[in-house]
Each structure stands twice: as C-alpha cells, then as structure tokens.
Amino acid sequence: MYPESMKESIKKLELTRPKRIRLQKEGAKIFPDMSAEERQEVLSKFHPDYQDDARKVLRVGVNKNEKMTTKFVDVLESYSRISSTAFDLTRADYETDVLVIGGGSAGCAAALLADENGSEVILLTKLRLGDSNSVMAQGGIQAATKDHDSPMLHYLDVMGGGHFDNIPELAKALVMDGPKVIDWLINLGVMFDKDKEGNLTVKPGGGTCRPRMHSARDYTGAAIISVLRDEVLNRPDKIKVIEYSPAVELVLDEDGKCAGAVIYHLENKDYHIIKAKSTVIATGGYGRLHIKDYATTNHYGATADGLVIAYRAGAKLLFMDSVQYHPTGAVFPEQIVGFLCTEKIRGMGGQPVNKEGELFVFPLEPRDVESASFIRECQERGLGIRTPTGRMGVWLDTPIIDIINGEGTIKSNLPAMHRQFQRFGIDMTKEPILVYPTLHYQNGGIAINERCETNIPGLYVAGEASGGVHGRNRLMGNSQLDINVFGRRAGIYSSEYAKKAKIAKLTLSHIDKYEKEVSELQVPVSRISPILLPDYIPQSVKDKQRRPKDAGLIV
C-alpha cells in the first residue's frame, strides 16, 4: 500500500529497530524524559493552542472579555435557531422529573442512576442512542484498583497531567469513585481484559506513574456504551428515549431555574417543549468544529450544542482556551485521516520514529507534549514523512510490539485497529503506521462542582461538556472514567433536586437578552447556533449557489 517514497523511510526504521529493541529489553531508557522546562518550550513553540490566532476575546455573556478558542468564540457570538415568542410556554409536549440531554455513556449513566433514585427520566439524543464519542474510545479506562496503586497516586497524575489547573474537588471525585465505577460496570456486564487466572489486567498510559488502564481489547468505549445503552433500553417504562432530537435551547422559569428544553426533531422538522424539574447536559465536545482546521477523531454530532445553550442561559464556562490534540491520529491512507490510533499502542511498546528511523521523543509523554513534539519533528526539523497528498506525519513502529511481546499480541489486543489498517492493505504487525496529531478532546466546558451542579439551579452537567476535571490536558483513559463517574453523580444529584423542585412560569426571555448583546456586535444574522451538524459544503460551492440564476453558475 505504501508508495516507494515512503518505503525508503520504512527501510531506515527497520535498520534502527534492532538497537531500539535491545535497549528496551535491557531496561535502558530508550529516550530520556523531558525536563519541565523542555516540555514548556516545546508546548509554547509548537502546540496549536499557543499560536497567535488560536484564541480571541469573547464579547458576550457571563464569560465576556475572556480569551477562548477562536472558532468556538464565533459559535457563541451568534443568534438562536428559534424566536422566544414562537412557543406557547403555558403547555409542554412532554413533562418529566429529570431530562438528560445526550445519549453517550455520561447520559446513559445519568439516566440509569436518576431512575434508580426514583425519578421519571427522558433521555434526549441528537442521533441514535449511543452515537457519541463514547463509542469511539479505544484504549481504556483508568482506575486505581490494584495493590500497587492508589487513588492518591492517580490524583497526582491527574493534576500533573492537567498542569495543576484542575479543580481539585473534581479530580478527587474522579479518582475516589474510580474503583467503584469499575465494579459497577463489571456487574452490569462489561467484559474487561483479564489474565489466565481471571484477574483484571492493566496497562500503562502517558503521564502516569502506575499501570492502571483497564481495557476491552481496543474497543473499550464500545464495550462500555453497549452495556449502558442496553440497560437503558431495558427500562422502557422508566426511561423514555427520544432519538434524532437535539436540544436547541434551554427553558428557564421566571425564578432563573432550569426547567427543561426546546427540542428539534431532525426528521420531522418539528419543535417541542420538554418541561423538567432538573436537566442534565451530557452532549460531549466540539471536535467537529475542526479547531485550527485539524482532522478529528470525534463523531459526527460533536458540535458543542450543550455548551451553546447552557451559555446562552447564563451558565459559566471554564478553560475554553484549551484543546487536546491526540498525538496519534492516522494520516495515511487518506480515507482514514484523523482516525484515532489508540495510546494503548505506545503503552504496549510502539515507538514514534521519524523519517530517518530515529526515536525522537519518549513514547509516553503527556498528550500535549507528545503532540507538540510530533509537530516539531515535521515542521521545524523537517524529519516528517510526506504522503502522496502532501500531508506530513511520523511513523508509529507497531511491528516492534509483536517482536517484544510475542507474535499475535497486536491481533489479540488491538483487533479493531489491525482490521482498520488491513482494509487498506497495511499490515501493522509487519509495517509501521503513519500518524500525526488529531483534534481529540475539549479540555474545558461548563463549570460544575463535585455534585455536577452549575451556577443555574436545576442544571447539571456530566462528561466532556463539563470543565475543570482535567485542567488543560487530559490523560488517557480518564475520559471514560469521567463520563461514568460524573454521569452517575449527575443522575443521583439531579434526581435529588427534582424531588424538591417547584417550577415557576416558563420563559425564553434569556434568548432575547443574549441576542441583544450579539446584535450590538453587528454579527451577521446568518450566524446561528447550535450548529447541530457540521457543514462540509465547500465555500466555493456555497458562493456559486448564492449567485443569480442568470449568471449560469447555479449548482
């Protein structure tokens, strides 16, 4: 599959492999750790977040005058999809105790725990139940379940990985609930990897001091969400699922409490009002905004909808100046550019190597440092490998995994990854794969406390839509833990709130207040959010569509 120009570089990689294997088997340091100063230098020079045009000042709402990711600022400085006067708020199409917006693992966990705590639940999802970033997670879920480990050590890794910007109470909740979440998932039916004696196995991840990565081969997220989704579907009398219906605005009451949402059915093109005593946002991240024009690992619906509607209602945001780029996104073949190549590959011994066959960075640096090092190798040092379409990347030496650990290790531990590349004629047991950083995770989000509460009474947030758990950089496997820990917590605490909540007269007046600010900025009225689904129509095509018919250029 690889063209001759790339095969020449593979030959150099194969020549250096025996030495790299020897050093690794001898327990020698195959590449020295960076100092704190070196890490900061590579980040400041090469990480996309640090480029001059990466951020700009937000001019509306409760976070006004803060710098945020440029493209996300444009999404926030926009008009609503609806008019505040278009709805009869004296009646609702649906009523419930707890409304959960989002059908990934965080949303499913919230719905399950809200139900178990005695609340009626409506679970709302933009696409199908389970269509989310959750199902695409590969490598694993971190939790300190082994004797050699502890939540304290996990906490230190979480804080260090997040550059100590994490909210300490959230990081504490994450690690303390970790072992309990693993037990909960196992009891529900998740089949984590085990050794021959039936004990859970764990692997190392970047930026961690202990191996604590629990996995289900390389489809851990799919294994978890399939069990949670089935559990939700097994409770049809208690959890009502509404698919293909994103929330386009939150509904408040006259006392400022969250009281449900306006939803839009993608197929029927109808709007409906859901009245709820408490609401959980679990809508995930914004990878499909393609920050800095990077390819993304994210699913099709990841367009920041939950953040937009929460912010327009007055919820505070946190760390929205920080984006995570996963170091190993596929960059060849062209059909799977951006596809996630799990960090588990490097945890099992895979090594990042440049076009000269040189290992140029420790394989398990924290993700932001690893990504910045890949970019430096391609941009400054000129040691990246060029694809036929002009993209640049570095090799991930995957055959070394089978050589060190025994033949069949890759097929046994990374079956999904092996099949994906085999579809295009690349056998990762015999050939390296080409990778480059890909937009992976939204580090920031809606500000919450350890009970998942926002500054708006009755509004809760769980998962990637929240901010503060991971600081400004998330470590591998902590997202799968996050969505389950805080999904469960959101379900419990939203249910508790709903049992006591009294809803006053419904209102959408916050939309008018927000749009007044937007209009004063002279923002084009065509800029509308939430986006709902990404728009991949080229601008040149759009321009032609707008021209008069007599120009003869209508397409």
Image: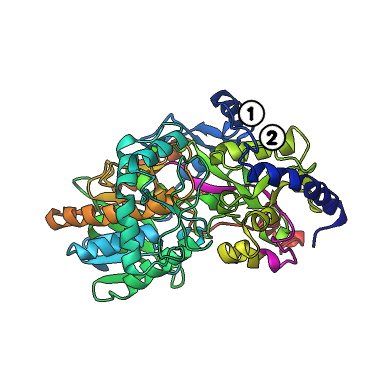
Residue drawn at x 78%, y 43% as measured from the top left: 355
Q: Viewed as shown, does residue 523 lie left or right of 82?
A: right
* Labels 1 and 2 touching (C-beta < 8 A): yes
* Label 2: which secondary element: helix
Residue 126 among magenta residues: no
Q: Quadrant of the N terminus?
A: bottom right
Q: How many numbered markers are drawn? A: 2
Residue 194 in picture, x, y percent from top left: 44, 63
Q: How is the image coloured?
A: rainbow
Residue at mark 1 to residue at mark 2: CA–CA distance:
8 Å
Residue at label 2? Answer: 376
Above/below status of 109 relative to 446: below
* Label 1: which secondary element: helix
Task: Please tell me which of labels 1 and 2 falls first in the chain.
Answer: 1
Mark carried by residue 209: none
Q: Nearer the viewer, residue 16 or 492?
A: 16
Residue 342, quarter of picture: bottom right
Residue 273 in picture, x, y percent from top left: 30, 63
Residue at label 1? Answer: 45
Say few, some or many: other residues with alpha carbon within 10 Å of mark 1 (under 14 / 14 to 19 / 20 or more).
some
Above/below status of 428 relative to 173: below
Residue drawn at x 83%, y 50% as measured from the top left: 11
Callout 2 amino acid = Arg
Callout 1 amino acid = Lys
Q: Quadrant of the C terminus?
A: bottom right
Q: Which residues are magenta?
A: 421-444
Residue 85 visible (yes or no): no
